[in-house]
Amino acid sequence: MAGISRSTLARLEAGNGGTIDSLVRIMRALEIEDRLLDVMPDAKLSPLDPRSDTGKARQRVRKSSEGEAGEEWSWGDEAP
């Protein structure tokens, strides 16, 4: 016995979704849990994934300032 309801089994058989937990329970009941990796897609990093270059997600991104880096800044009421 897999420990899931008939409606859950019917949904999975019809291809209407379910949980990984339900799938694993059914595979264990059928004694085919060793084939779980056969039904899972290969995990690949997307070229759009920010972690693909360094393996770490970027924590902060700073935008460049509007003014030039070497320009002296002063309050609006101060004379240069």
Image: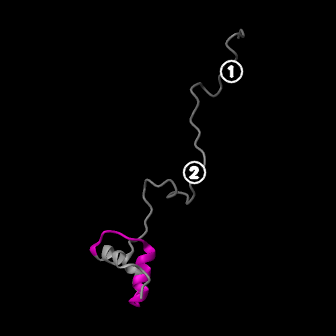
Name the residue that disc number 2 marks: 58
Separation of residues labelled 2 and 1 (CA atoms):
31 Å
Which residue in the rendered view is the most extreme toward the left? 14
Q: Count residues near mark 2 (Cα–Cα under 10 Å), then give few for <14, some for 14-19, many for 20+.
A: few
Identify the image quadrant of the C terminus: top right
Label located before the other in sequence (2 or 1): 2
Q: Quadrant of residue 41?
A: bottom left
SS label for mark 1: loop
Q: Which mark is residue 15?
A: none
Which residue is under mark 1?
A: 72
Going 42% across and 71% down the picture, which residue do you hit?
A: 19
Name the secondary structure under disc 2: loop
* Residue beneath the point at 41% across and 81% down: 36
Label 1 crowd bin: few (<14), some (14–19), many (20+), radius 10 Å: few
Mark 1 residue type: Glu
Q: How is the image coloured?
A: one colour
Q: Nearer the viewer, residue 10 or 38?
A: 10
Residue 13 counted in the magenta span: no
Q: Which amino acid type is marked by label 2?
A: Arg
Estimate the x, y position of residue 30 in percent, counting from the top left. Answer: 38, 89
Looking at the rendering, the stretch of residues picked out in magenta corresponds to 14-32
The structure residue drawn at horizontal position 40% and vertical position 78%, both measured from the top left corner, is 23
Image height of 37 relative to 30, above or below: above
